[in-house]
Image (cartoon, rainbow, N blue to C red):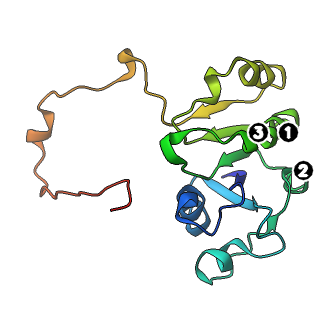
Amino acid sequence: MDTAIILTAGILDTVDAKTAHGLIRESRRFEILAVVDDTQQGRDAGEVLDGKHRDIPIYATVEEALALKPAYCIVGVATNGGIFPDSMIKDVVTAIRHGVSIVNGLHDYLSEREDIEELAALHQVTLTDIRKPKKRGELHFWTGEIFKLKTPVVAVLGTDCSL
């Protein structure tokens, strides 16, 4: 399991940090070492989130959290319009300069920012924009194969917005 820290830009205790909330509660992909949130430093992330101690410390700065030697730095916020907060760019740059790869769930792709892409290449880290669509050749299209399955069909519906 890869290690990671999460950036929350001072909004860990709001619904706009829903990415961080999910990762704090459970992740099968990452071992969450710490959260960076200057409004909650010194606390446990689980206690801030829902009162459950999870041994995930909160640091005020990314520099403090980088002492834990994470492999990844995850952008843990969902902003209006998916725009990358300017206040977080400095933290991303710091992480990259320390050899830490970035995972970004916003619609504003870091891999399309020339300066960030060049810095990542220089420090040999990856930029993963998880919302960036795959190239057409990597996509899967309807084939009808689903009708060959003999399992029950269950509709699972939901929203990604506040209602």
Marks 2/1: CA distance?
A: 7 Å
Left/right placement of residue 18 relative to residue 159 reads right
Say which element carries label 3: helix
Dot 2 alpha-carbon crowd within 10 angstroms: few under 14, some 14 to 19, many 20 or more: some
Residue in the foreground of this view, choosing between 29 and 104: 104
Q: Point out the tag, 2 or 1, that comes first from the N-terminus.
A: 2
Q: Position of residue 40 (x, y in %)?
A: 77, 70
Q: Element under label 2?
A: helix
* Picture coordinates of residue 59, whole percent (x, y): 83, 63
Nearest the viewer among 142 and 47 is 47
The amino acid beneath tag 1 is Thr
Residue at (18% x, 28% y) in the render: 142
Residue tagged 3: 92
Which residue is disc 2 drawn over? Answer: 63
Question: Up-down: is 7 above or below 11?
Answer: above
Q: What amino acid does circle 2 point to?
A: Glu
Q: Name the residue tied to disc 1.
A: 94
Point out residue 30 in the picture as x, y percentages from the top left corner. Answer: 64, 54
Q: What residue sits 11% from the left and 31% below the top? A: 144
